[in-house]
Image (cartoon, grey):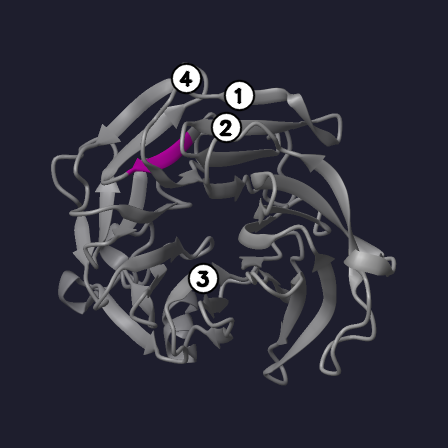
Amino acid sequence: MTSRVGERDAHQFIVGTHSLREKNEIHVIEYKEETENVECLGVYSHPYGEIWQLQSCSSDKDLISTVYTDAKQGWKCNVWKLGQGPVGGGEEGGEMEADHMDQLLGLESVVELSGHEGPISTLRWSIVEEGEEGSPESIVTLDSACIRRWSLEGGKFDQKHCEKSPEIPGLTTGCFDPHHEQKFIVASQSNILSWDFRSNKSAESISAAHRGRILDIDYNPNRPYHIVSGGEDMVSRFWDLRNTKLPLNQLGGHTHWVSNIRFNRFHDQLLLSSGTDSNVNLWSIVSVSSAPVGELEGGSASEKEGDKLIKRYEGHRDSVYSIAWSSDAWVFASLSFDGTVVINNVPQSEKYKILL
């Protein structure tokens, strides 16, 4: 699941299915804040295999990319355009069940990102903010062997513009550095590396950042060198890449693996974490944010609010493997292994503390 980042006027999410027996699909859904209803805007046929990763383009809301497994060819990655018309008949078309739309919509293949070795653990699409110029769009994938980056040239992705790192064993996850377009943060088992594409080597690193594998990493959108990581040791840790001897802060809040962790792009004191304990936690982490609550209001040190768990969302019955903020600052979605999508809001009381 991913937020439809290119759609800035609505709360839209894109969800892919992961089925061995059924034909897989991609669903575009929208949350209507006024009525608190969720509507399905379209269901697209993805008959190519189980969807393991899904990302959307920030500059074109109809471009997406998927990582999937092909029964004959193994792991594959492709960029697609969401088509407006139905798919054809035969193997890739056909009618949907009664609770679906009358007919599946089609995906148009833009380019296959080929050459991967083994499972593809991570797919990330760079975010170009609205009105931002001069920043090239790119996709980064991690497989069992190395980091690969594809750049958008002349309006399309070209295999000629693929950069490849030396072999790095045990890659598990990664994310873009929003402050340095030539850097990408990766986790190799329990270690963290800041990869610089210019030199094609690690610029900063953290050894043994967690006890066990790191399952997700995110970069603070407002503070350079500040990241957060979550792992199999059930904790989330905050780091400054310039001083990595000790974490800046640590959060518990989960009774099993921390599977996903995400900063709010607009208000970095808001943080989401999800786990294989079926819970989604919303945190206020003022100590490591760029604008702590209270400081902007001119309050004294004793009046400033500390880090806290705002709310634990227990709407899932299975492990939560995906979370995403919408293009708005206050709405987020979570997806569990059983296919349940839950959409929630930041509580109004917390929203007003940040805005007022």
> Can you tell which mark lies on residue 323?
3
Structural distance between the alpha carbons of marks 4 and 3:
30 Å
- Give amino acid for label 4: Asn
Q: Which quadrant is home to the N terminus?
A: bottom right
Q: Nearer the viewer, mark 3 or mark 2?
A: 2
Which residues make up the magenta segment? 184-188
Q: Inspect the magenta stretch and tell me whether residue 185 lies in it.
A: yes
Tell whether label 1 touches label 2 (CB within 8 Å).
yes
Q: Nearer the viewer, residue 298 or 255?
A: 255
- Crowd class of label 4 (few under 14; some 14 to 19; many from 20; radius 10 Å): some
Q: Nearer the viewer, residue 134 or 326?
A: 326
Q: Nearer the viewer, mark 2 or mark 4?
A: 2
- Which is more N-terminal, label 2 or label 3? 2
Q: Inspect the magenta stretch and tell me whether residue 19 lies in it.
A: no
Q: Is residue 242 left or right of residue 59?
A: left
**Residue on which the image places disc 1:** 163
Tell whether label 1 touches label 4 (CB within 8 Å).
yes
> Can you tell which mark lies on residue 148?
2
